[in-house]
Image (cartoon, helix red, strand yellow):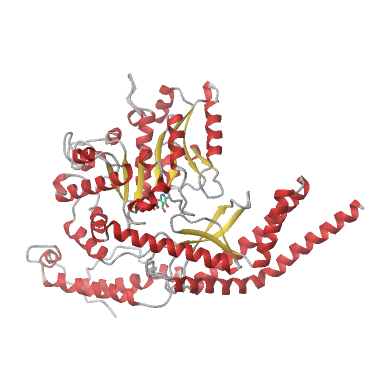
């Protein structure tokens, strides 16, 4: 079907804009669009749509901007057929693979308000009430995390001279803003030195007598920390990665060792620790660092202390989770993502600073937008133009409320515990994390192979050096095989497309130093029931066992080879 040709003229174009007497078409298309979306929600079938990536590239292969205007109606049909049908159903209760998940329907309506108002949060002239909403929202979150006094919040909730934090596009910018402040605090203006942001990193190091400056985070750190180091001139290789303990938390002893090493360097190798970053909800396993200990250590080495709580921070809404975050209230800054556990649609980050003065380190002004002494929010942000995204999170906290979030997180926790329990009981799976915040890392491993691994682990821990070395080699070989099995299983699950979990590689805490391929479930969709989890496991087990048949000969070969090697060795010894 060819689209109807539009005779474009200014009168027609004027009618496309929102005016006091907006045309009925606005309501008509609004209804149509909501209906299209409603149908999408009702659709059954595959999660990813069966269209292939090459087929998609053929649909979107126009190389020039269209010349002739089209009717809105026709473009809506095109959006429905070409885009909506081929989008990922991240809201499906069978989709338990990513932090991007289901959202409440009222968010779609709030998005409409945001677009309709089209406020630009950069300055008061383009964002009036919305600037006050943003400050109120930031004060709520600041209080939730840092728990300063009533008087502090009464004084600062709408104090335009300071900023308690920023609303950002996402968690990456949140982390970057925090590390920007950390960098400035590490090399502040002093004497004739104008500060790092003015003089640059090279001069800052020279002025303060350092050869190198580093940021420290655990091996589970999100890659946004490296991105920030890159953009801030610190350099990715200056992000030091500390191993994790068995619970995927930063290994405090290893961290202390690293810091001891840094402190002991010669004068011409002096190294400044710009920041230590704690993680409150690791991306891969959802675990929380020992935030309390990290705070003390940061103070001891005079380093800025940032907590990346992009994943887990919102759990503080529920009082019983606070103990997991002990010490967070003493961090210098904390980043949280609204599009994760606040159940907001893509995308919005929040970064909060314990001291209301810290954002002054990056404060800036310009003649045409954010004049000195203005009340504009843009004075304190890395980003320029920003949408009124925080309306969604602000309204969600009112509509769902802390009680509602408590119920949602309760469901998420039950789902995670239930999934772990059925995986552990199944015999053909191995779970790798003690879930704290609704993420589970696990893999498919047939019972016999798992038992062999356990046996070799025992040998490697309790035997002579030589035997232990041999056992470690066997463990490596089996893990290598099981990695291949899980990659294949994951691909087969993608083909099956009725369920979805993600896949990643972890430095194993059990089988160090083996890298293992794991499946990863993020269990936050309130519509994911125990029955659905049973189904997901059943599908994974069925397909996993089918694929294992192809791997079994290789497995048997490894075992035979080991038996033969043992025999030869025993004969030689005789
Ligand atoms: C722990 C953590 N930090 C930071 C980020 C980055 O957030 P965003 O994708 O919103 O930039 C993520 C994203 O998954 C994360 O899990």
- Whether residue 490 is visible here, answered yes or no, is no
Q: Is residue 21 above or below residue 230?
A: below
Residue 478 falls in image quadrant: bottom right
Extreme residue in the right direction: 574
Q: Is residue 172 above or below residue 302?
A: below
Residue nearer the viewer, 532 or 514: 532
Q: Position of residue 92 (x, y in %)?
A: 39, 70
Q: Is residue 301 left or right of residue 487?
A: left
Q: Is residue 300 left or right of residue 342?
A: right
Q: Position of residue 306 (x, y in %)?
A: 39, 40
Extreme residue in the bottom direction: 1
Residue nearer the viewer, 507 or 226: 507
Q: Is residue 374 above or below residue 436?
A: above
Residue nearer the viewer, 42 or 150: 150
Q: In this view, does 266 lie above or below 416?
A: above
Q: Residue at x 26, y 40 (%)?
A: 164
Q: Position of residue 336 (x, y in %)?
A: 35, 49
Q: Residue at x 52, y 21 (%)?
A: 267
The count of marks equals 0
Extreme residue in the top direction: 191
- Whether residue 52 is visible here, answered yes or no, is yes
Residue 97 falls in image quadrant: bottom left
Residue nearer the viewer, 249 or 337: 249
Name the image quarter holding the N terminus: bottom left
Residue 195 falls in image quadrant: top left
Q: Position of residue 226 (x, y in %)?
A: 45, 43
């Amino acid at each position: 079907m060819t689209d109807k040709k539009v005779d474009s003229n200014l009168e027609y174009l004027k009618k496309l804009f929102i005016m006091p007497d907006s045309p009925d078409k606005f309501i008509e298309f609004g209804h149509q669009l909501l209906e299209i979306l409603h149908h999408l929600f009702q659709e059954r079938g595959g999660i990813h749509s069966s269209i292939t990536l090459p087929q998609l590239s053929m649909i979107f292969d126009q190389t020039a901007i269209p010349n002739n205007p089209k009717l809105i109606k026709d473009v809506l049909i095109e959006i429905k057929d070409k885009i909506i049908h081929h989008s990922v159903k991240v809201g499906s209760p069978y989709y338990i693979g990513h932090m991007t998940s289901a959202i409440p329907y009222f968010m779609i309506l709030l998005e409409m308000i945001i677009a309709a108002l089209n406020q630009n949060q950069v300055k008061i002239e383009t964002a009036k009430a919305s600037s006050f909403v943003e400050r109120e929202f930031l004060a709520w979150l600041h209080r939730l995390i840092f728990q300063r006094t009533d008087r502090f919040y009464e004084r600062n909730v709408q104090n335009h001279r300071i900023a308690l934090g920023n609303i950002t596009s996402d968690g990456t910018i949140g982390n970057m803003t925090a590390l920007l402040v950390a960098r400035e605090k590490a090399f502040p203006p002093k004497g004739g030195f104008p500060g790092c942001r003015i003089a640059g990193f090279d001069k800052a190091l020279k002025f303060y007598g350092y050869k190198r400056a580093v940021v420290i985070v655990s091996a589970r750190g999100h890659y946004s920390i490296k991105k920030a180091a890159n953009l801030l001139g610190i350099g990715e290789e200056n992000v030091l990665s500390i191993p994790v303990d068995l619970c995927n938390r930063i290994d405090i002893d290893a961290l202390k060792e690293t810091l001891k090493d840094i402190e002991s360097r010669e004068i011409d190798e002096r190294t400044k620790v710009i920041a230590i970053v704690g993680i409150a909800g690791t991306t891969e396993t959802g675990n929380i660092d020992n935030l309390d200990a990290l705070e003390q250590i940061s103070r001891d080495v005079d380093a800025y202390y940032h907590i990346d709580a992009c994943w887990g921070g919102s759990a503080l809404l529920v009082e019983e989770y606070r103990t997991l975050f002990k010490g967070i209230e003493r961090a210098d800054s904390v980043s949280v993502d609204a599009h994760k556990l606040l159940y907001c649609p893509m995308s919005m980050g929040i970064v909060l600073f314990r001291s209301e003065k810290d954002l002054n380190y990056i404060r800036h002004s310009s003649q045409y937008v954010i004049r000195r002494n203005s009340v504009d929010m843009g004075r304190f942000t890395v980003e320029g133009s920003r949408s009124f995204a925080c309306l969604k999170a602000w309204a969600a906290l009112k509509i769902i409320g802390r009680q509602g979030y408590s119920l949602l997180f309760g469901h998420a926790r039950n789902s995670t515990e239930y999934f772990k329990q059925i995986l552990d009981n199944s015999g053909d799976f191995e779970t790798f994390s003690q879930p704290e915040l609704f993420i589970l890392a696990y893999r498919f491993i047939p019972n016999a192979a798992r038992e062999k691994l356990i046996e070799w682990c025992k040998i490697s821990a309790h035997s002579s050096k030589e035997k232990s070395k041999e056992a470690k080699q066997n463990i490596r070989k089996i893990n290598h095989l099981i990695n291949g099995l899980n990659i294949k299983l994951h691909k087969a699950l993608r083909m099956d497309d009725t369920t979805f979990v993600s896949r990643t590689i972890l430095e194993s805490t059990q089988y160090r130093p083996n890298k293992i391929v794991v499946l990863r479930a993020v269990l936050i969709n309130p519509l994911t029931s125990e029955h659905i989890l049973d189904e997901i496991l059943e599908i994974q087990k069925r397909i996993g066992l089918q694929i294992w048949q192809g791997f079994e000969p290789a497995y048997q070969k490894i075992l035979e080879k080991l038996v033969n090697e043992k025999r030869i060795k025993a004969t030689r010894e005789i």
